Amino acid sequence: MQTVTMPTVMRENVLVEPDCVRILDRRVFPFETSFVTCRTVEDVAVAIEQMVTQSGGPFYAASAAMVLAAREAQALAGSDARLDLMRRAGARLVATRATNDHIANVVAVLLADAEAHAGADDFLVRFEAAVERVWRERRAAASRLGAHGARVIADGDTVLTHCWAESTIIETAAAAKRDGKQVSFICSETRPYLQGARLTAHSLAEMGFDVTVITDNMGAWAMARGKVARLMTAADRVTMSGHVVNKVGTLQLAISAHHFGLPYFAMVQAPDAKALSDADVPMEDRNPEESLHCLGHRTASPLAKGWYPAFDVTPPHLVSGVVTSNGVFPAAALFLHFDQTGS
């Protein structure tokens, strides 16, 4: 079994320091390895909104921000005052990104813990332990997902992926390597932030994989030329109806994969039990100006306007399977395998 070292973006994601939270600035990585220092919940919220961290990163950033809130709450007298502060902090963080539910889920878990121990003298100690617990649980779930994901990859496959898939694609790649499979990857660049070209490509290459970057308009032709064995992406959210909500551009790749008879697997730790269909998922439209720029440089005519829907929706008939921490399931039959708690 081969030893696999996790890439920089996974190892140095969010750091909780005695007086601040430091978040790896994914907007400039790998050209620079720099951190945004956040001393307040508001600082973290703004960092999430400004795309300092994306995909699964906000899960860790938001929970770290809740530690900052707990440090402030520890100094307050009475459980009511503490809980009011913690709830306001949680609401601010949840409001940063609406489509991906990682933040809302972890904030709900941590607020439940805060409510249970709000009056304790060691409130902060208990809360920090709760954050450490949810981080361990998430990493363990990601590892299980990776093991299931590796099973749908054959030795010698070239996998096309889109955007930055955080632990899902990284853990899947790591599991495939441990299994001794030879796998290569094609990463779409993913405009306008180039997460695929920078984060995914760099991380997989750090792990020792052969990686090719293509522009966002090359996916279908790469499939037509026989360069792709399967499409695998993360999902910001999967509904109980099997609709996959992910970075915009996923839908066109799934359509192409279906046309060329290639499997498409979406990866998420569990479907969202609260979202019965895609109509239940708020879809984020970002500032249109972002589509007119790339890495700080304007790339569009000054006479043109932009449009930036951050996510799209892939219907279940285009999805070969949903890889979760509990196994791989048909997209159209998730309701048979997951109850309303998502387990």
Image: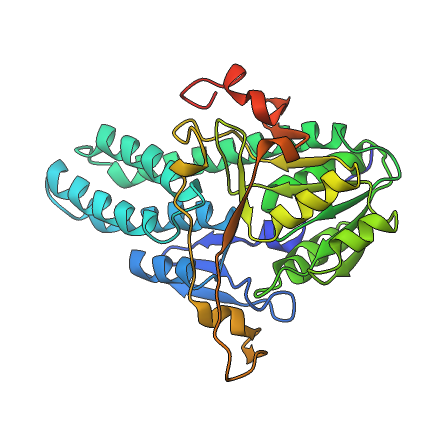
Q: What is the x, y in percent for residue 251?
A: 61, 46
Asked if residue 6 can be seen in this view, the reply is: no
Give the residue displayed 45% in from the left and 24% down from the top: 342
Is residue 237 rendered to the left or right of residue 163?
left
Q: Which quarter of the rendering shows the N terminus?
A: top right
Q: What is the x, y in percent for residue 151?
A: 75, 27
| Quarter where residue 259 is shown | top right
| Quarter where residue 104 is shown | top left
Q: What is the x, y in percent for residue 141?
A: 56, 30
Q: How many marks?
A: 0
Q: What is the x, y in percent for residue 33?
A: 59, 67
Against 133, residue 23 (above or below) is: below
Give the residue displayed 38% in from the left and 29% down from the top: 274
Give the residue displayed 32% in from the left and 51% down from the top: 95
Pick whichever, 152 or 44, lies toward us. Answer: 152
Asked if residue 282 can be seen in this view, the reply is: yes
Give the residue displayed 63% in from the left and 23% down from the top: 330
Is residue 91 rendered to the left or right of residue 261?
left
Q: Residue furthest top?
A: 336
